[in-house]
């Protein structure tokens, strides 16, 4: 079995593959100071709950946009699973040319998402990832990573409102029944939800207008299903896109 670990700024997503089949996946809070032993204790419990054999993990793959967390994750693999994991980064074979001015600046998660989307659709793609940041990544019909856009994530914006405005509360991120809120919570939900739907559609529309080929628009991230319901441009939702991309990259490099 292959264990993949995607360490994001807010959440860490983990998945277990047997060949091309995703057997189980989990989402835990990212903590930069989490130790290798804590990873082991958490993962061992999750494996037991899923009925998966801990001793059958034979390979590992790690992607992270949180550099301080990498050492603990690698140490977890080496000490508790006796595995040296592959790490998404310079030197890893992706099969995808990076057209960024400095390819090293592109986050590991963005490359992984681009690889997974192109592998599935084999055409021009725009990947929208609703995470700590909302990222938009363009892949050409030749399978090249062409660049993209980065905006503040919807959860990050909600937290910023709560922290910066003394009288505004924390709110649940849901689709409100109306864009015209009748109270503070509903008004904040309307601004956040419909504001980010509009942001998504505007950036995707402008990206499509700048290229001479059609683009399939795929949304991923924990909030993707929520946002896709009202978006005019999102055509497909895949919350497991990053994990799938990591499995593909492992197969290309093993």
Image (cartoon, grey):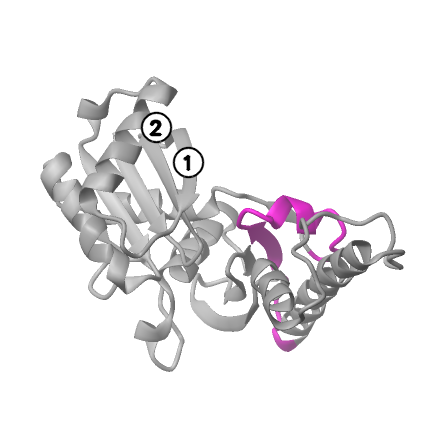
Give the labeled residue for mark 2: 46
> Is 222 part of what is drawn in magenta?
yes
Image: 243 above or below 166: above
Q: Earlier in the sequence, mark 1 or mark 2?
A: 1
Front residue of 93/49: it is 49
In this view of the protein, which residue sits in the foreground, 35 or 154? 35
Which quarter of the figure has residue 5? top left
77 on left or right of 139: left
For the C terminus, the image quarter is: top left
To which residue does mark 1 refer?
A: 26
Q: Quadrant of the N terminus?
A: top left
> Residue 76: percent from the left, percent from the top?
18, 43
Q: Is residue 111 above or below residue 105?
A: above
Q: Is residue 166 above or below residue 93?
A: below
Are there few (<14), some (14-19), or many (20+) residues within 10 Å of tag 1? some
Please give left or right for residue 226 compared with residue 29 in the image.
Answer: right
> Label 1 vs label 2: CA separation?
8 Å
Q: Residue at x 71, y 57 (%)?
A: 233
Which residue is drawn at the image coordinates 67% and 69% (left, top)?
166
């Amino acid at each position: 079995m292959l264990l993949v670990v995607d360490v994001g700024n807010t959440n860490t997503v983990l998945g277990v593959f047997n060949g091309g089949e995703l057997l189980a996946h989990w989402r835990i809070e990212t903590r930069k100071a989490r130790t290798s032993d804590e990873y082991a204790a958490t993962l061992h419990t999750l494996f037991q709950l899923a009925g998966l054999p801990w001793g059958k993990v034979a390979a590992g793959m790690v992607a992270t946009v949180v550099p301080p967390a990498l050492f603990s994750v690698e140490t977890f693999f080496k000490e508790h699973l006796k595995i040296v994991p592959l790490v998404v980064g310079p030197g890893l074979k992706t099969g995808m040319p990076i057209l960024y001015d400095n390819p090293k600046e592109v986050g590991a998660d963005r490359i992984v998402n681009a690889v997974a989307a192109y592998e599935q659709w084999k055409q021009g793609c725009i990947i929208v990832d609703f995470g700590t940041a909302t990222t938009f990544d363009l892949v050409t019909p030749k399978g090249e990573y062409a660049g993209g856009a980065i905006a503040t994530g919807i959860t990050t914006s909600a937290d910023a409102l709560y922290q910066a405005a003394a009288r505004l509360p924390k709110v649940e991120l849901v689709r409100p029944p109306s864009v015209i809120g009748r109270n503070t919570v509903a008004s904040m939900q309307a601004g956040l939800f419909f504001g980010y739907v509009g942001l998504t559609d505007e950036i995707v529309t402008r990206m499509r207008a700048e290229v001479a080929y059609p683009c399939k628009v795929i949304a991923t991230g924990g909030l993707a299903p929520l946002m896709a319901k009202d978006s005019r441009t999102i055509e497909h939702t895949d919350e497991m896109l990053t994990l799938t991309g990591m499995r593909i990259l492992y197969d290309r490099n093993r």
